[in-house]
Image: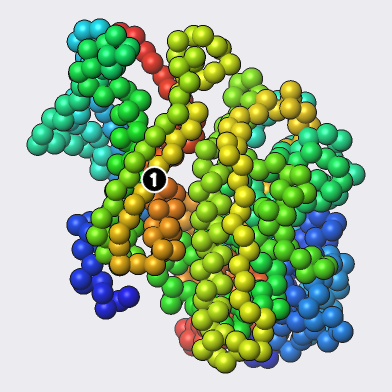
Amino acid sequence: MADSSSTVDNGVHVQALLDARDALTKAPQAAQFKWRAACEWKNGTHSHSTVESFYGLGEEQHRKTTFKFDADHPEVFASADKGATPVEFVLVGLASCLTAGIAAVAQNRNIQLKSVTATIEGDMDLAGILGIDSEVRNGFNGITVKYKIDADAKQEDIEALVAQSQKRSAVYDIVTNPTNVTVQVN
Amino acid sequence: MSRCLAERSIDHVLLERGEVAHSWRTERWDSLRLLTPNWQSRLPGFSYDGDDPDGYRSLPEVVDFIAGYAKAISAPVRTHTTVTSVRDADAGYLVRTNRGDWRCRTVVLASGACNIARVPSLAARLPASVASLTAQSYRNPAQIAEGGVLIVGASSSGTQIANELQRSRRAVTLSVGEHIRAPRVYRGRDLEWWMDAAGVLDERYDQVDDITRARRVPSLQLAGTPDRSTLDLNVLTDAGVRLVGRLAGVTEDGKAQFAGSLRNMCAMSDLKMRRLLDLIDEWARANGLDHAVEPPDRLPPTRVEEAPPLGMDLVKSGIKTVIWATGYRPDYSWLELPVLDRKGYVTHDGGIVCSPGVYLMGMQFLRRRKSALIDGAGDDARELSAHLAAYLDNAAPRLSA
């Protein structure tokens, strides 16, 4: 394993991550981050969100690019379909978080990835959000993620990558555990 | 440690708040058996000589064993002596007790890793009608009201208490977080035999990649079952225990919330178990044992129901008792030395504490993977007593000058 460490490259700077972990262990205050997005209503169910700044390492951080996201609902909801539905953003968040985790864990374990693809599906009963049945929740009843991974590793090591990625994933934690949400007006 | 110090003619005293083996006498549930087999409790100059080497000591047998050792080595124990503080004093330490003060040049902290049951803060939100116990205060089923029991934590303690209560006709729900599954007997030998023989237990703290992580790993989900059977989540499911995810919250109106991560918790545990058994198989092959022991086998994967419940109204579901089997932490309320990290643990390098002449013992992976086992005390004591003796030798000229 040690011999292959120089050749495995999943494009993840594991050493930088390990250094950051060391630094943040010594300075726990710098580990306090705030992630943000801004959202503006356009028309109907269409909204436009931007992501640019965040707080971390003790100061405001700014990106070179402002990322833009349009959210809407599909035509079967009599909407204009100008973007993915918000629940699909949640699926994108979960899949991309788990996938990034797989790459990082693989790099750390000296496993060369050749391809990683995932499909993700959330089951929802619309009787919840439409107020048809108060027993039915608004959110997903369950989410299924299916990975196809080609890597220089045994099946069992690949399964361990996927399991470890779930253990360390922020979005997986957010989706599987309750979070206090405070919504203020003005 | 006392035995090793005596061998070096180092004058010492052992301060014990109660009787020898106090925590084993007062802080364990009645049916608990030692997780390691009888043969494995090897102490310097003392080991098992009975006719059941593969058995697991009952609680009274553990007490007898430890008290017997204290007697056999004539350990200078001062019983019913509670340490109230340890602080710096001229060229050494001042140890205050309820029975007078001691001045000493070195101190060995052997007060254990499991003094206080860890209970998450959300315990405060339990409905008033639900009794709350810990693995430390639980004794036997007679203590528990008829009806439902929610046990939080599925490591060794949680699974054993769940098993006992389910079989005493309580309806047990077990909240499962990170845990490590392990068969009691593998290929005809105790799992501890394999880990001992293959050198897993001797792995040193300065040889592992990430010692901080290694020290945090939950203990193996083992039980000292008289019939040497494995106690895992599948056994509990068969007995009627309901598995739910990690307890993530309790709402204002008394609803327990469980994480949706149960499937991954079980998958990780199965993977870790298979990895350990693969390592054992490899070792058996390399050491020509393949034909001397039974062939390899693997327990079936942990069964998780299709959609495990994510919430439970505790009162409406008939939960009368919650038992926290969520781990322990040491109590250093008496330790007035600047040696604690921000989480309240003693900072040390393989048991050598940053305050000169202070040593630590009996903690998870202190110097070796086996450090927290009875069987691990001997090697750690031999090495730490050597360090302690050298410290006294080096310090002596300075002190007398």
Horizontal relation, residue B130 to residue B303: left or right = right
Between A18 and B272, the one lying in front of the other is B272
Q: Is residue A82 above or below residue B180?
A: above
Residue B396, percent across and down?
52, 86
- Near mark 1 (Cα within 10 A), the count class, few <14, some 14-19 or many ≥20, is few
Q: Position of residue B131 (x, y in %)?
A: 77, 34
Q: Secondary structure at mark 1?
A: strand
State the residue at coordinates (68%, 57%): B232
> Where is residue B283 drawn, in percent x and y?
53, 84
Against B196, residue A40 (above or below) is above
Q: Chain of mark 1?
A: A
Amino acid found under the numbered disc labelled 1: Lys
On screen, residue B250 above or below A101: above
Number of dots carrying numbers: 1
Q: Nearer the viewer, residue B136 or A128?
A: A128
Which residue is the site of mark 1? Answer: A146
